[in-house]
Image (cartoon, rainbow, N blue to C red):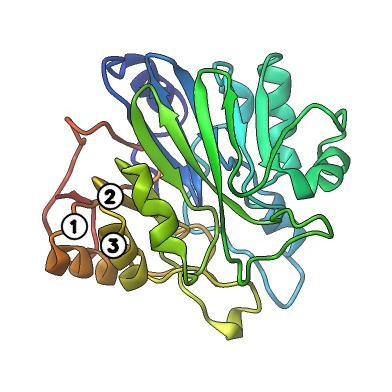
Amino acid sequence: MQHPFLRNDALLADIAGAPTDTVAIWWLGQSTFLVKSAVGSLLFDPYLSESLSKKYATSDKPHVRMTELVIDPARLGFIDVATSTHNHTDHLDGETLIPLMNANPDLQLVIPEANRAFVADRLQCASDWPVGMSDGDTRKVGPYTFTAVPAAHETIDRDDEGRCHYLGYVVDVGGVVVYHSGDTLLYASMADTLRPFNIDVAILPINGRDPARRVAGNLNGEQAATLANDIGAGIVIPCHYDMFEFNTASPKRFVQTCKSLGQPCCVLQNGERWDGQTNQGQTNQEDGGRRCR
């Protein structure tokens, strides 16, 4: 079992003590990122429970956790907005979101509009509470401006009204543009869609696609690095690995491709912060360990 860089009280102290004159981002595991700035705190796709490990413990596809849980979601009582990019449990987890909702009575949740009924059922919330979006929509949610773009997990799936079930979000965080892709493969117009946003921070999955896993696939490390470079991202942070033993990948290929392309990247441990200025414990080793370039 891997130990997070920071967890529990130490993580909360780091969040509280982070500078507010810049954007700080913590990787909390899988596709979960906490973004803090002077305008507030945003939580992308929180999965902070053992729900999948418990659900599949006796199945032929056990979700054996690789890294310790960083924080109980009930302790994150300062979140303004959270997101779900799609309905898979590691992106829409009732055991995470219900405690988070209880800890944050004014929380807003951004979801794909196509998933509204499913979200309301899973979270046992009012169906009109989440903020629904489809690709091309731009909305002000709390202190943030969200634009939704398609994600292909593994295809761009739409409901009968043409609304995407899988999304990525481009978010203006006090003047810093952050793109969280959700789970996605490459699709034909992806780079052209993203390039005009002048993305400062791209958050992309690197676990790849292996049909033997019997789950929908994602970008691999080389693809994530290349996409970040193609869209002109200021920096790219990888995710969606080091959570479950059956569905992970080393960041080594990602780092090597970024280096060959001259694409700035930062590989974090769970519970570690990036803020564009100070990156705790960063290294330059070439084995896929933590580094920011």
Front position in the image: 210 or 197: 197
Instruction: Quadrant for residue 13, please give it.
Output: top left
Under tag 1, what secondary structure? loop
Percent x, y of residue 238: 36, 55
- The dot on residue 233 is 2
Residue 172 vs 256, above or below: the answer is above
> For this view, does 212 lie left or right of residue 236?
right
Under tag 3, what secondary structure? helix
Residue picked out by circle 3? 230
Determine the residue positioned at 30% across, 19% down: 18
Percent x, y of residue 100: 67, 27
Q: Residues within 10 Å of mark 1 (few under 14, many from 20)?
A: many
Determine the residue positioned at 72% across, 64% down: 57
- The dot on residue 263 is 1
> Is residue 2 in view?
no
Determine the residue positioned at 47% across, 72% down: 188
Q: Earlier in the sequence, mark 2 or mark 1?
A: 2
Front position in the image: 148 or 27: 148
> For this view, does 63 lie left or right of residue 132?
left
Query: How many numbered discs sit on the rendered protein?
Result: 3
Residue 254 vs 6, above or below: the answer is below
Q: Amino acid at mark 1?
A: Gln
Q: Earlier in the sequence, mark 3 or mark 1?
A: 3
Q: Amino acid at mark 3?
A: Asp
Q: Amino acid at mark 2?
A: Ala
Percent x, y of residue 164: 69, 55
Between the residue at mark 3 and the residue at mark 1, the CA separation in whole angstroms equals 10 Å
